[in-house]
Every structure is written in structure tokens, then in C-alpha cells.
Image (cartoon, grey):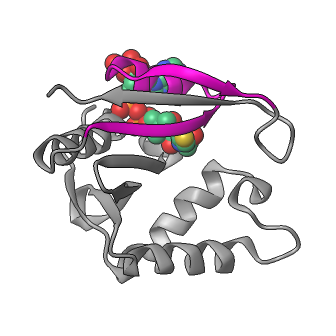
Amino acid sequence: MNPIVVIEPMVPADLDAAVGIDVSAFKPSELGAGSQDVRALREKQLTEELSRPFARVRVARGDGGVVLGYLLSWHVVDEVQLLNVAVATAARRQGIGRALMNDLLEHARASGAAKILLEVRASNAAAIALYESLGFSTFNVRSGYYADGEDAAEMMLTMAA
Ligand SMILES: CC(C)(COP(=O)(O)OP(=O)(O)OC[C@H]1O[C@@H](n2cnc3c(N)ncnc32)[C@H](O)[C@@H]1OP(=O)(O)O)[C@@H](O)C(=O)NCCC(=O)NCCS
């Protein structure tokens, strides 16, 4: 089934749902939480993102406005950095991640960005397949980049002039 989603700016009322998606998608250590409450920490981080002038936080809403996924990017001069894209576990493989990425690509093109950059865990086959299907390619591997020792693949999409 292909749910109909709309991609819109995240608003503070969406924070709880976005935090829930992150907490089920990532380990507390991946979200930067040590002994802290991971939900509280993530809510604080995303609240900060909502107030950053260069951050863009978009949600994918399904029926009844429910948040099924979200994407966070930073836009600095002519570069876009993808910081996170995550889809609720039950809503995966239905095109929502791709819809969020296409929204990012459209915005990058419309705002004249030269490239989009991202870092992804080398083992994250789902995300890497999504990025590659959109034309991203790996230009560097940062060995042992993550706190648990995993490598990061640095990927880039150069926007057509
Ligand atoms: C990565 C993620 C956002 C993809 O979202 P999604 O809504 O499931 O993705 P889509 O349904 O739009 O799939 C788009 C493409 O991604 C790839 N893909 C998605 N899930 C995949 C999987 N489990 N295995 C292999 N490829 C996969 C495929 O190329 C797919 O295209 P196809 O369905 O035509 O084969 C989702 O798996 C997720 O939230 N993962 C946890 C968070 C995360 O790791 N984010 C990336 C951080 S850098």
C-alpha cells in the first residue's frame, strides 16, 4: 500500500512523534545520550533545530495529520547537509523516505545549492540504497567515525548547474 503523505514544515506539536520515531530508529548512544533520558535529550535537540534559521525540518504526514517520518537538514551558503531522515518502523518501505528526500532535493535545486552532503553508518544498507537511488555517491569513508567504532560513509549529490 502506498500511503498518501504530505510533506510540511515541522511544528512544535510534532516533536513528540518525531522523538518517538528517533527513539525506535536509533540506539540512545547514536542520539548522543549517555545516562540521560534519551527522549528528553532528543526533544531538546529538535526544539533547538526548530529555532535555527539555517535548519529545515520537514515532516511527512499521513491520514489525520499523523507524523510518519521527518527530515532535518542544514542549509549553509550553497551547501545542504542532511542530518537525519527517519520513518516510523511500521510505515517503512512505502515510499515515505523517498518522498522526504525528493522534497529536500527540490528545495536544494530551488535555492541554488551546489551540493547535498551527508554521513551514514557504513552498515546502514537501507539508507545507503535510498541515497544511491537518488544519485548520491560515496566520496570518502571516515574510519571509526562513530562512538562505537563504526565507519561513516560520506556521500554527496552534486546539483546540476
Ligand atoms: C532509511 C529510511 C529513512 C528509509 O525510509 P523508507 O520510507 O522505508 O524508504 P522508502 O520506502 O522511500 O524506500 C526508498 C528506497 O530506499 C531503499 N530501501 C529502503 N529500505 C530498504 C531496506 N530495508 N533494504 C534495502 N533498501 C531499502 C530502496 O532503494 C527503496 O526503494 P524501493 O522501495 O523502490 O526498493 C528508513 O529505513 C529509516 O527510517 N531507517 C532508520 C533511520 C535511519 O537509519 N536513517 C538514516 C540516517 S543517515
Q: Residue furthest left?
A: 110
The stretch in magenta equals 114-143
Q: Is residue 159 above or below residue 52?
A: above
Asked which quadrant contains residue 106, the reply is top left
Asked whether 121 falls inside the magenta stretch, the response is yes
Residue 124 lies, in percent from the top left, at 62, 29
Residue appearing at x 82%, y 34% in the figure? 144
Q: Is residue 1 visible?
A: yes
Q: Residue at x 33, y 19 (%)?
A: 135
> Closest to the observer: 105 or 63?
105
The answer to if 124 sits in the magenta stretch is yes
**Residue under the image location 42 percent in, 29 percent down:** 156
Q: Is residue 47 left or right of residue 144?
A: left
Position of the C terminus by quadrant: top left
Q: Nearer the viewer, residue 64 or 88?
A: 88
Residue at x 24% of width, y 39% of height:
105
